[in-house]
Image (cartoon, rainbow, N blue to C red):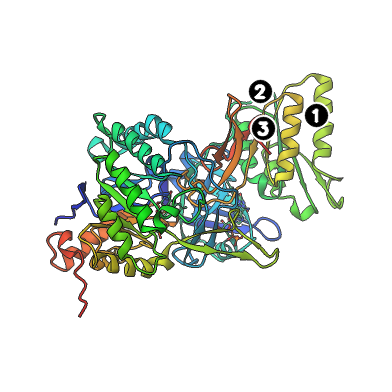
Amino acid sequence: MDLSVNLGGLKMRTPVATASGTFGYGPEYVGALDYAQLGAVTVKGVRLDPWPGNPMPRHVEVVGGLVNAIGLQGPGVEAFVEYYVPNYVETVAAAYGTDNVPPMIVNIWGGSVEEYAAVAKRLSEAAAVAGSPIGAVEMNVSCPNVKEGGHTFGQDPAVLEKVVSAVRGAVKLPLIVKLAPNVPDFRPYVAACEAGGADALALINTIPAMVIDIETRRPVLGNRTGGLSGRCVHPVAVKAVYDVHRCTKLPILAMGGVYEAKDAIELILAGATAVAVGTATFTDPGAAARVAAGIADYCGRHGVAAVKDLIGTVEST
Amino acid sequence: MLIDEETTIVSHEAAGPGYRFLVVAAPKLAAALAPGQFVHVKVPSLESSALRRPFSVFDADPAAGTVTVMYKIVGRGTAALAREVPGGKVMVLGPLGHGFPVACTGTPLLVGGGYGVAPLHFLATRLVAAGHKPILFVGGRTKDDLLALDRFAALGVDVRTATNDGSAGAKGFVTDPLDDALIELRQTGGAFELFTCGPDGLLKAVAQRAVGTGRPGWISMDRHMVCGVGGCFACIQKIKLPNGEVYNARCCVNGPVFAAADIVW
Ligand SMILES: Cc1cc2nc3c(=O)[nH]c(=O)nc-3n(C[C@H](O)[C@H](O)[C@H](O)COP(=O)(O)OP(=O)(O)OC[C@H]3O[C@@H](n4cnc5c(N)ncnc54)[C@H](O)[C@@H]3O)c2cc1C
Ligand SMILES: Cc1cc2nc3c(=O)[nH]c(=O)nc-3n(C[C@H](O)[C@H](O)[C@H](O)COP(=O)(O)O)c2cc1C
Ligand code: FES
């Protein structure tokens, strides 16, 4: 059985990655799941300089999911490249062997077009070092939790094209652009990503959301609002992937409420080339590996020789 | 290395009104856990997307292969957990976080409030085994809030209590008997270290005393957590670095135990 897929140039051993912001910088879950089953590991959003993130509380549990407003806390690209990247390779290789270090998808964001490009350039240099795990760049233009950057770039197709082409000019690595689900029509955004030179699209990011404490009459989150993820967003992701797949040839990395293989296969049938497991990992650290094994099992049961044969094969008539 | 162990409930008994002792057979975790570390528990009967619940380790017995947590029923997760019976399976993730330092100079002074005595109990077992004579200071609103005192007494720990209503021990705050002991230690010149876990107000009071006396203070902080492993940045506490810079530490991996002098309140 062939579980491998090619996501816009990123070769993945299985079609299952981890989702940004739910898997730290990669080594945090060593011991809790078999990294050999992962097609890629996506790390927490990285920007140019260190960023403190939002005030506490940064999350609230809701039935079927989670609302978070972490606010993209991070150490900045230099510390990321100097410490976190080598630490990832060493820790994962020590536990699972050098052949089983999944490629790293580096999620990036910035407060300006120039900042996105500068982060991408630094990652491009880092990726050129022998043994670097960096396999792709994922641009977050859709985080609902940070006013200073992120989603503003994903809201306007003209700005989106500008920032994508600036990053494209700075990296040869496969370039993935991560979109928000809360737009009335994906087509202008997809067209902007294509025009800007993206190799793949990722969706969905979290959905803007809010929780109010009725006793205090105050928003629960320190940031007041946040983003919804988890099981409850899965049907939204399926629809988004279905719509986007029908208007582009770019491969899609799909995320949103993947807990079981069944959820991943739905997304693949809707048009995804690969999936990422996010919030599910919090409840079940082994979720991503379990999903990969379940996809293999499904292919076996359905006589599917290669998982790529399933992409976009939902019957629409 | 993390261990996500499928454990079996060995016993599940009351630890006071509204409190439970949960003992699980978890040989791998029992051998790996250190005092001050915590575990992340998947409550079996909650919906499959419910987050795990973090609990300090009250005891880990490598010989028996058991891990004990002591918890308070406060919300839907702990209420659902309380309905589990012996023989049931529970997924437990650990060992998580940086615990208390293993070496102690002088008399260990343990200060607990509410379920905050849980990690102090595990610590006391190891301190006693290493030949220390810890003193436990424990406070609460009423005598019902003073938990597991018999377990500390059985270890030979000197237990000093205070309650706000005077229903057990001295009437007042736990810092009263603590301050008495600190005065005595100052007079005799005895060395000591402070270890604490409990509500933030108590932690701050103990941290101030550690900083004020220039002695080491080890503060175990309780912050709402999502992943418990450093993966999500939900559990932040402002911490001072050696170079004076302040950063948002992740309580689950950089803590939950921090040095008193490093905490920015
Ligand atoms: C490192 C650490 C050690 C802990 N040790 C113990 C212990 O030994 N004994 C004990 O009784 N409790 C302990 N707690 C607190 C315990 O995790 C919460 O009481 C428990 O999660 C409440 O869950 P619930 O579903 O009953 O409450 P709900 O209020 O319904 O929970 C809703 C959400 O908030 C979170 N939450 C609520 N209260 C807390 C809290 N005080 N701290 C962290 N998260 C919270 C829950 O995990 C859940 O995600 C510890 C917390 C941390 C962070
Ligand atoms: C706590 C948390 C932090 C996240 N941080 C990021 C981030 O830094 N960058 C990003 O592009 N997406 C981030 N996301 C979004 C996820 O990568 C994913 O797109 C979304 O949660 C939907 O997938 P899920 O339902 O499987 O979690 C975050 C999500 C969560 C829950
Ligand atoms: S709970 Fe996720 S980083 Fe601490």
Q: Chain of mark 1?
A: B
Left/right of residue A254 with respect to residue A311 in the rendered view:
right
Q: Secondary structure at mark 2?
A: loop
Q: Earlier in the sequence, mark 3 or mark 1?
A: 1
> Residue A15: image x %, image y %?
24, 55
Q: Secondary structure at mark 3?
A: helix
Q: Quadrant of the N terminus of chain A?
A: bottom left
Q: Is residue A195 visible?
A: yes
> Residue B118: image x %, image y %?
63, 46
Give the residue pinned by disc 2: B105
Q: Nearer the viewer, residue B76 or A20?
A: A20
Give the residue pinned by disc 3: B260
User: Which quadrant of the view contains residue B75?
Assistant: bottom right
Q: Is residue A41 above or below residue A275?
A: above
Q: Residues within 10 Å of mark 1 (few under 14, many from 20)?
A: many
Q: Chain of mark 3?
A: B
> Residue B22: image x %, image y %?
57, 55
Left/right of residue B199 with respect to residue A231 in the rendered view:
right
> Residue B165: image x %, image y %?
86, 53
Q: Nearer the viewer, residue A263 or B85?
A: A263
Q: Nearer the viewer, residue A309 or A167?
A: A167
Q: Secondary structure at mark 1?
A: helix
Q: Chain of mark 2?
A: B
Q: Earlier in the sequence, mark 2 or mark 1?
A: 2
Q: Quadrant of the C terminus of chain A?
A: bottom left
Q: Is residue A187 above or below residue B160?
A: below
Q: Is residue A287 visible?
A: no
Give the residue pinned by disc 1: B182
